[in-house]
Structure formats: C-alpha cells, structure tokens
Image: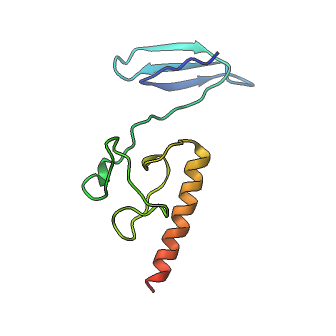
Amino acid sequence: KIDFIMESEITEFYGNESLQRVKIEHQGTHETNEMKIDGVFIFIGYVPQTKFVDDQVKLNERQEIIVDKDFQTNIEGVFAAGDSIEKKYRQITTATADGTIAALNAIEYINSKK
C-alpha cells in the first residue's frame, strides 16, 4: 500500500540496516509525527517553478514554459527542458532526456553563431 502525504516534508530518517521510520512535518501547521515505513518516494511537487522567467518567455496557463521541438523558447537561443516545460509525461527519464536534447540543441545553436 502506498500512502500519499501532501504538503509535508521529511525532516528525519531512522533505521540501522534499512529505513524503518521517518519524521514528517506538515508545511502548513508545522505539526510533526513519525511513521513506520518500508520505503520512501519523494515527490517534489507539480507546480513548475518558472516565476523567474514569467516576464520573459511564453508560459501556458499552468505556468509551464512553452518550447518548440528543439526545446527552444520563444526567445532565440534560450532553451528549456524537464518538468518546467509544457509536456505530457513527467518522469525522471523524460526530464533527463529533455535536458540532453536541449543541451545538444543549445550547443548547435551556439556553434552556428560562430
């Protein structure tokens, strides 16, 4: 069974040979409790952290950066990748692949300007 605990942060991990329990703090109430567990999957969140570029690149209604097939934004030479962009799947593997493709396209763009 997997339980989702939202708006919380793990503040301590306990265990000897393996993870046995965690201390969790709720972000709103700051209430803490400990839970016995067998494993942890940490989910950072689903709101893209794009405020620092919101007045520069085009964003959709969910505040995701809009990119083309080469991961270039509406600003020439500015590329974006990973979970901050508009896309269907949000997995570590897809974000990593996006980053690789965006980096290769950025290198190609820079080299074309030499």
Q: Is residue 30 above or below residue 110?
A: above
In this view, which residue lies farthest toward the left?
Answer: 55
The quadrant where residue 77 appears: bottom left
In this view, which residue lies farthest toward the bottom?
Answer: 114
- The quarter of the picture where the N terminus appears is top right
- The quarter of the picture where the C terminus appears is bottom left
Residue at the spot 75% in from the left edge and 25% down from the top edge: 17
In this view, which residue lies farthest toward the right?
Answer: 17
Which percent across, then down, holds residue 57? 31, 58
Which percent across, then down, holds residue 55? 24, 55
Display coloring:
rainbow
Residue at the spot 49% in from the left edge and 64% down from the top edge: 70
Residue at the spot 33% in from the left edge and 47% down from the top edge: 60
Which percent across, then down, holds residue 23? 53, 19
Which percent across, then down, holds residue 110? 46, 77
Q: Is residue 98 above or below residue 49?
A: below
In the image: residue 114, left or right of residue 18: left
In the image: residue 51, left or right of residue 24: left
Residue at the spot 68% in from the left edge and 19% down from the top edge: 38
Circle count: 0
